[in-house]
Image (tube, rainbow, N blue to C red):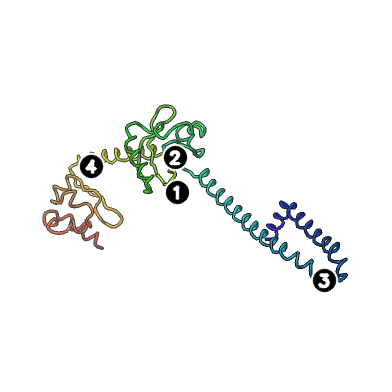
Amino acid sequence: MFQLDWFILKKNRWLYLLYACIFVFIICKNFLFVWPITRSVEAMIIMIIEDLIPVVMLTAVVHVLYTISIHNKNMLSKKSQEYKSLFDNHPDTILYVGRCGHISSSNANIQSMTGFTPPEILSLSLQSIVSNANWDKVTKRFQLALNGVPQHFTCMINHKDGSCIDTKVTYVPSVVNGEIVGVYAILKNVTEVKRQKKEIDHLNRQNRLILNSVSEGIYGTNMEGKAIFWNSAAEQMTGWTAEEAIGQPIRHLLASPVKIYFPLWVKILSWIKR
C-alpha cells in the first residue's frame, strides 16, 4: 500500500501542488478579509477549517478513486501478462481466428509446425492452411465453436513446402462481455504419432500371420491371467474361437472338457492353479 501511495504521489505531483495552492489561498483569503474585521484568531481558524473541509473531502474521494483505478489497472495488466505468457509459451501451436475466419494472431510454434512465420500467417485465412479435403469438416466445427461449443477433431494442415500435416485440433470459443468474438485454435502435430501407430499395427498383423500359420496352439495372457491372443491352432484344439477366448481367464479356457482330450494340459492347469 505504501508503494502504491508513493506511486500516486510521484505521478500526480501537480494534483497535490494544486491542493497546496488552494490551502494557501484559503489562509490568505481569511487573513486578508476575516482578520481585519474580526481581529479574532479563533474566528479566522474556524473559517479556515470550514473552507478546508470540502477540499479535504474532495481530496480523500479523489485519492480513493485513483487508488482503486490504479489497483484495477495493475490487476488487469497482470492478468493480461499471464494470458500472454500462456499463449506464447504453450507447447502446441495456438491461432486466434476471428468470426470471419481470418487469422489475427499466433504464437511462435506456428513456424516449426507449418513453416509459416507469425507475420506470414497473419496474412492468411483459416481456409488457406487447411487441406481442401477437410475444409467442409473444419467449417462445420468452426461454426459450432462460434455457437459456444468447444470442438475436438483431426484434420490435415498444409505445410508451406506443400506437404500435409496430420493435426489434432481443439477449438475454444473466445468470449468478451458475453459475446463470442472469435475462436482459439490449438493445433498439435500428430503426424509422427500416426506413423508409429501404423508401424505397430503392421508389426502386429505380421506377428498374427506368423503365429496363426504354425500348427501348435499358441495363446498369450496379460498380467491378470486373461487371454489376449489365441491362434488358429488353439481354436481347433480347444473349440474356443479367438473372439470367445480373448478376455477370458485362461483357467476357464483350459478346464474340462479339454483335459479329457489333452491330458498334458491337465498338468499345465494344475501348475497354473498352484
Label 4 vs label 1, nearer the camera: 1
Spatial CA span between label 1 and label 3: 62 Å
Whether tag 2 and tag 1 are in contact, CB under 8 A, the answer is no
Instruction: Report how far apart the C-alphas of labels 4 and 1 lie in the structure.
Output: 56 Å
Q: Label 4 neighbourhood size at 10 Å, few (<14), some (14-19), many (20+)?
A: some
Q: Which residue is mark 3?
A: 43
Look at label 3 and name its amino acid. Answer: Ala
> Quadrant location of residue 171?
top left
The disc placed on residue 175 is 1
- Of the two numbered discs 2 and 4 on the same chain, state the one appearing first in sequence: 2
Instruction: Give residue 3's quadrant in the image.
Output: bottom right
* Amino acid type shown at disc 2: Gly
Q: Quadrant of the N terminus?
A: bottom right
Secondary structure of the residue carrying tag 4 is helix
Q: Label 2 to label 4, Cα distance in Å?
A: 55 Å
Amino acid type, callout 4: Leu
Q: Which mark is residue 211?
A: 4
Which label is found at residue 98?
A: 2
Q: Position of residue 67 (x, y in %)?
A: 65, 58
Query: Separation of disc 2 and disc 3 at Cα?
Result: 69 Å
* Horizontal arrangement in the rendering, residue 40 relative to residue 83 (left or right): right
Q: Is residue 62 left or right of residue 187?
A: right
- Please tell me which of labels 2 and 3 falls first in the chain: 3
Amino acid at pointer 1: Val
N-terminal of the pair, mark 1 or mark 3, is 3
Contact? badges 2 and 3 (CB < 8 Å): no
Image location of residue 272, percent across then percent down: 24, 59
Residue 222 as seen in the image, left or right of residue 89: left
